[in-house]
Image (tube, grey):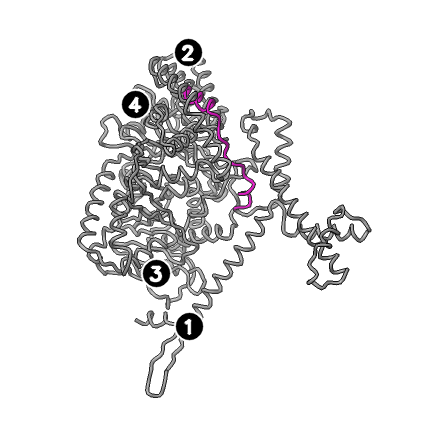
Amino acid sequence: MAEAHQAVAFQFTITPEGIDLHLSYQALNQIYLSGLRSWKKRISRIKNGVIKGVYPASPSSWLFVVIAILATMYMQSDPSMGLIAKIREHLPPSLSLSAQGQKVLSVLLFSTLLWMSLILALRFCLKLLLSYHRWMFELHGRISTKTKVWATLVRLLSSRKPLLYSYQTSLPHLPVPSIKDTLERYLESVKPLLDEAGFQRMTRLAAGFEKSLGNRLQKYLKLKALWATNYVSDWWEEYVYLRSRSPIMVNSNYYGMDFLYVTPTANQAARAGNTITALFLYRRKVNREELNPSRIPGTVIPLCAAQCERMFNTTRTPGEETGTHTHTLIEKQIHIKSDLMSLIWSCDLSDVLQHWQDSEFVAVYHRGRYFRLWVYRAGRLLSPREIQYQIQRILDDTSLPSPGEEKLGALTAGNRTPWAQVRKQFFSSGVNKRSLDCIEKAAFFVTLDDQEEGMMGENPSVNLDRYAKSLLHGKCYDRWFDKSFSVVVYKNGKNGLNAEHSWADAPIVAHLWEFTLATDTFHLGYTADGNCRGEIEHSLPPPQRLSWNIPLQVQTQVSESLAVAQALADDVDSHVFPFREFGKGRIKKMKMSPDSFVQLALQLAYYRDRGTFCLTYEASMTRLFREGRTETVRSCSNESCEFVLALEAGEDREHCRKLFRKAAEKHQNLYRLAMTGSGIDRHLFCLYVVSKYLGVESPFLKEVLSEPWRLSTSQTPVQQMELFDLVNHPEYISLGGGFGPVADDGYGVSYIIMGEEMINFHVSSKHSCTETDSHKFGSQISQAMMDLMTLLNPDFKEASKANPDKQL
């Protein structure tokens, strides 16, 4: 109770002698320091708003313009061509200024207007320059003069050190491709997957769509593109993510892993302390906009940073059905790590992303109990050692879960509509609302898992697979899947995270996680006995246990949601393996794109596994444009199929090599088109959305959007390699992350190209499908990688035999 009394700033009692007032100076001091931190943040936001508002100029440039205008006026020259005099004539008489004062004020006003005009002109010029993308299609070493001049101008206008969001207003809008180009690219992408009759039929459907409904839908889409910042992103977020009623666990959420070979400490509380601290340090950098804007590697071209805004203090809340319409329910298989994720048009319901400006605590789950852990005290971020101390208090807490509390998180793992109904009825007031608010308004969610995970034991491969499944779904109730991300810290010190997908794509979370791992290990570090560094203030109030009143009706729904989630989790067949025979270093020596190499290996592996080709999804980003997210690269092309068939038929090596390079060049071109706004699938998706708003049916769009992605792939980019010293510490290699299976009868494959000599793969499928096997497909991938390298370099096979140690 002492802590409760300390939390009260003042108390008073009424006695016969009058009112007896007791002030707690410690509590008042806490309030003062917290308020001071809040005001500092407000001032920082205002300052950053000014700095990024005038970018690519600087606030000090205003003074330079004023001095220049005053100097020219002093020399009896009028650079304003009479505008200063006009401004002076229109000054209100009430100002009561002398003639000299009116002149100076007029100069200041003119200088400010001129300065703002120059800023707008510079920003417009930068926007035009960033709209140029032909440089991406030029061959390495054959850069045109136009591109060289363009690159010089971009560097000049970007010479000032930007804040995180400085480029946002200078980024171009995503262009709407022409109907003709999109349909031509679509038909080219499906040609190797259809027989002659099927292709002719699809060609007729496309031609009919272009001549009739297509142009009408295109006009509406162009109108939206003129009005909206991005013609895709808001519809993509709503209809692909937030309107889905199926579980987001496995279907949508994805995971990130710890280091492969090392665990910085085996102390669970210490690892949690450093991890939480690192995440709050990253949040501080985001809030202060101290992070450098992401750029295309090797260039000065910035990428959109809008997705960073909802990284922390964000929760997806379930939406409840409120009405019905006559629209048709269409199910569409997409790459959002979802099995038949539905675009819902049959009812007015949608989840909502809620974001709060700030949060000074995290929500913690341990052995069925929920806690609120404050990480700020008197405006100060607790030290890692203090957070470890608080986490240890939770670990040492022997209290039992209240009735219905232990598996409450299963509500976020099951279907969305039951969760919305239960939330509205039983969590809208009282103690349940207060406790739910603590979870939803937390900076992020932390699970202190009582299992040990990682590559360990006598069977490290099996343990890696179990580690991946644990991060993807856990026990189906010990994660809060609605949070923007949940950190998991295991009993043996291993960690990882599970991220909700609607607010951001994997590269954003990967950037956060890279910083967290590097800061945890190389910046914060641990003592010799595995504890966090720093001092402890032992007067810290203990973490607050959340209270619940869970009636039997809610417990029944928890059991039903858990059954749905458990069936989904049990069906996941996950396989994680590091491919160590070679990495991007050897691939680049063959003058080949590493990503194209891996994608062609996946095509070869799938053909060997299933004896056919399939529609293949590779995620590409469109963050060259404002509020851009992703686009689809249809990696299965005519060229890739021709190469695979030739290789499997045992055709001449040189001929196969030529086909291989041709297929790789085609893949690179497809990737560039997707990045620069000339993809296929987002355009067709938006045309479909417009058709639904207009209440018209398109047989062509309906068929296109029902095609299954049986091979869904994604590369996790390494964006901050400078944070990891792989030369002196090669063991600090991240495993990357993965996602659940996309189609009932398909594979999900995520890969991360780490350093020069390793590529880590994450493969997922469903046990319920007799035609898929993640371990078998993983072996096919490894063999395909080896065969492709041997094709390019016949000497490689003998060299790999001489290095058997590279096998896991």
Residue drawn at the location 39% of the way across and 72% of the way down? 9
Identify residue type, mark 3.
Gln
Residue located farthest toward the top when viewing the structure as drawn: 652
Bin the neighbour count of mark 1 within 10 Å (Cα to Cα): few under 14, some 14-19, many 20 and up: some
Direction from residue 76 to residue 12 in the image, left or right: left
- Disc on the earlier residue, 3 or 4: 3
Q: Residues within 10 Å of mark 4 (few under 14, many from 20)?
A: some
Segment tinted magenta in the rendering: 165-188
Q: Residue furthest bottom?
A: 17
Mark number for residue 715?
none
- Between discs 3 and 2, the one toward the N terminus: 3
Front residue of 39 and 217: 217
Disc 2 designates what residue?
652
N-terminal of the pair, mark 1 or mark 3, is 1
Marks 3 and 2 sit apart, C-alpha to C-alpha, by 66 Å
Mark 1 residue element = helix
Q: Which mark is residue 609?
A: 4
The three-letter amino acid code for the residue at tag 1 is: Gln
Callout 2 environment at 10 Å: few (<14), some (14 to 19), or many (20+)? few
Q: Is residue 535 above or below residue 507?
A: below
Mark 2 and mark 4 lie on one chain; the one further toward the N terminus is 4
Residue picked out by circle 1: 26
Tag 3 residue:
390
